[in-house]
Amino acid sequence: MKKGLLIVISGPSGAGKGSICKELTKMLNLDISISETTRQPREGEVDGKNYFFVTKEAFMDKVQKDGFLEYAEVYGNFYGTPKDYVMSKIEEGKDIVLEIDFQGALQVKERYPEGVFIFILPPSLEELKNRIVHRGSETEKSLEERFGSALKEISYIDKYDYCVINDEVEKAANKVKVIIEAEHYRVTKEIYNLIQKYKEEMKCSTLQ
Ligand code: 5GP
């Protein structure tokens, strides 16, 4: 069976990764991985839907047991991608999206280089600032921290395969959809296996 794609989506806070992922689930048959985090839930966030909210002890215990495909400390909290869930989905042939920061993306690239790495950029720095401020879910300190980290996050763009500018969510999601669809036609190990099968069949067949 053909494996699913592991798609990594990163970008600075306020670039609109979350909204793009939401749109993608309407357009394509894929799963969004739910991360574990030690961050406190924001108003309206639901455990098991937005994140699995866990204690630092439980998180570190999972780190010890190599239970994360990747994990990182972002703005003073830990975030990690559950390894078994993601890998089993890929084996089942399902595409799965990880919405994670650049530190996590680098770790995934090490462990799973055949992943598809997509970076989301805001249309301008001014718009990024607007989006962070108007989200209204952060403290003043956290806003500064998120805006201050944007340039650092962007400086890792060369580690990614694709970059999409999110000027309008629906249009940007459509561009990501096109990338995912094209990636399904990449020449992979499975294709080499198929070619090998053709070669063997040809050895014992003629046109008559
Ligand atoms: P937020 O607190 O706004 O939900 O997320 C903060 C940052 O953590 C975002 O850049 C988000 O992409 C990143 N993030 C969310 N989940 C994970 C994860 O499992 N691993 C890593 N490395 N980053 C994550």
Image (cartoon, rainbow, N blue to C red):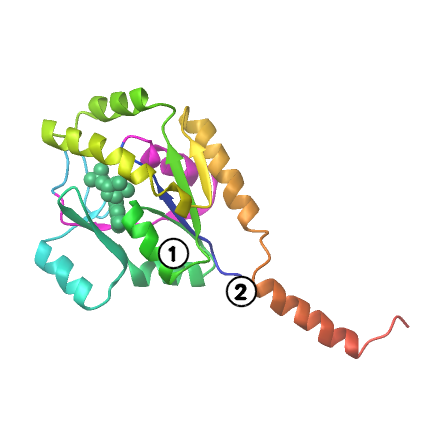
Which kind of residue does numbered mark 1 sit on? Lys
Residue at 86% across / 74% down in the picture? Answer: 206
Left or right: residue 162 compared with residue 41: right
Residue at 42% across / 43% down in the picture? Answer: 118
Taking depth in this image into account, of 18 and 64 the one nearest to the observer is 64
| Residue 34 visible in rendering | no
Q: Residue furthest right?
A: 208
Left or right: residue 93 compared with residue 68: right
Magenta segment: does it hold 22? yes
Q: Residue furthest bottom?
A: 204
Residue 119: name its quadrant: top left
Which kind of residue does numbered mark 2 sit on? Met
Question: In what quadrant does ligand 1 lie?
Answer: top left
| Residue 46 visible in rendering | yes
Residue 43: name its quadrant: top left
- Residue named by callout 2: 1
Indicate the secondary structure of the residue bearing disc 1: helix
- For label 2, the crowd category at 10 Å Cα-Cα, with few meaning under 14, some 14 to 19 and many 20 or more, is few
Left or right: residue 163 compared with residue 14: right
Q: Is residue 46 above or below residue 15?
A: below
Indicate the secondary structure of the residue bearing disc 2: loop
- Residue named by callout 1: 109
